[in-house]
Image (cartoon, helix red, strand yellow):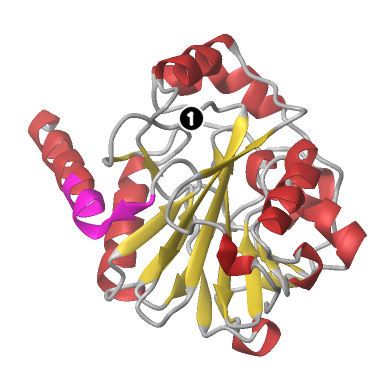
């Protein structure tokens, strides 16, 4: 995307874009106050950039706790997740503010069909004709615009369950459904691979590019530090641990950076430590 002035902006510092439609619960409001200056308000967009080993850039736009990642290489770009539907116009503005043209995004990969990741994709599809890629098993959610039942894993999730479970979006029709794996090279011009990894949802996808992986809600970052945590919603924790081991060992053995759907990015050691700790905790409570 060769757009004049693109490199005029500072690349390493988060930039803020105010969100006109931000809606926060009391907990999120409290957290946004507590983290002001460090993570910035949850009622705004933060923007950060990581450069990968092959020169690919991952631009992370965070709104309402949720990340949308724009993967950019040369003149090509694709988006991994698109946030809530209500945030899509603001996301497009934030992308444009970085000198990246949202009309030229070649595809949107939805790591899964939950409203906080998939909701904005239909807006881009309607406005720009952007192709949308969904994993087999989540097309029911994108067809209905409704989340399947969520299994909270901690008190924060239990507090948020009603609003997260009830979040909806306008139904959308995927352009491509991924059965097992899909190369993005032909469609996007970027050497990246989408792999289906059922767990958080049946159609959950991860994207492997250069020495990184974008993992959706396979796990999450922490609010206050660089650590990794089990995602807020996960129905089978044993299966989740196996999936993470499969990701680290087979799907993305060269990945050193992981971009989750919430907070992050995360270093490999942070992910390994978190899931090794979980394995120990689980085995220690077994008879
Ligand atoms: Zn999710």
Q: 163 or 71: nearer the eye?
A: 71
The residue stretch that appears in magenta:
265-273
In depth, the one of 18 and 279 nearer the eye is 18
**Image quarter in which the N terminus is found:** bottom right
Q: Quadrant of ligand 1?
A: top right
- Name the residue at 77% across, 72% down: 104
Residue 190, position in %: x, y?
57, 83
Instruction: Decide if residue 237 is on the left or right side of residue 18.
Output: left
Quarter of the image for residue 96 reads bottom right
Residue for point 28% across, 76% down: 254
**Residue 131 horizontal side relative to residue 203, left or right:** right
Q: Quadrant of the C terminus?
A: top left
**Residue 187 drawn above or below residue 95:** below
Residue closest to the eye, 265 or 233: 265
Mark 1 sits on what residue?
40
In the image, is 120 to the left or to the right of 264? right
- How dense is the environment of label 1, judged by Cα within 10 Å: few (below 14), some, or many (20 and up)? some
Magenta span: predominant SS is helix
Residue 268 lies in magenta, yes or no?
A: yes
Instruction: Inspect this view and state whether residue 189 appears.
Output: yes
């Amino acid at each position: 995307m060769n757009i004049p002035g693109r490199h005029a902006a500072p690349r390493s510092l988060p930039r803020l874009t105010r969100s006109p439609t931000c809606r926060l619960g009391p907990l999120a409001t409290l957290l946004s106050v507590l983290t002001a200056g460090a993570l910035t308000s949850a009622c705004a967009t933060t923007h950060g950039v990581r450069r990968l080993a092959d020169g690919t850039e991952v631009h992370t736009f965070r709104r309402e706790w949720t990340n949308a990642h724009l993967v950019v290489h040369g003149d090509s770009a694709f988006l991994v997740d698109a946030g809530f539907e209500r945030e899509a116009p603001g996301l497009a503005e934030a992308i444009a503010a970085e000198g990246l043209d949202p009309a030229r995004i070649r595809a949107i990969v939805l790591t899964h069909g939950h409203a906080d990741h998939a909701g904005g994709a239909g807006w881009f599809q309607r406005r720009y004709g952007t192709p949308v890629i969904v994993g087999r098993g989540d097309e029911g959610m994108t067809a209905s615009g409704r989340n399947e039942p969520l299994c909270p894993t901690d008190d924060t999730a239990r507090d948020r369950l009603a609003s997260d479970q009830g979040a909806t979006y306008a139904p959308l029709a995927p352009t491509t459904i991924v059965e097992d794996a899909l190369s993005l090279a032909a469609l996007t011009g970027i050497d990246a691979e989408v792999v289906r990894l059922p767990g958080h949802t049946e159609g959950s996808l991860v994207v492997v590019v250069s020495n990184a992986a974008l993992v959706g809600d396979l796990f999450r970052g922490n609010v206050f530090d660089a650590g990794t945590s089990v995602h807020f919603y996960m129905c089978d924790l044993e299966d989740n641990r196996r999936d993470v081991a499969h990701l680290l060992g087979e799907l993305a053995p060269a990945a050193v950076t992981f971009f989750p759907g919430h907070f992050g990015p995360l270093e490999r050691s942070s992910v390994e430590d978190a899931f090794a700790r979980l394995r120990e905790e689980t085995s220690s409570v077994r008879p």
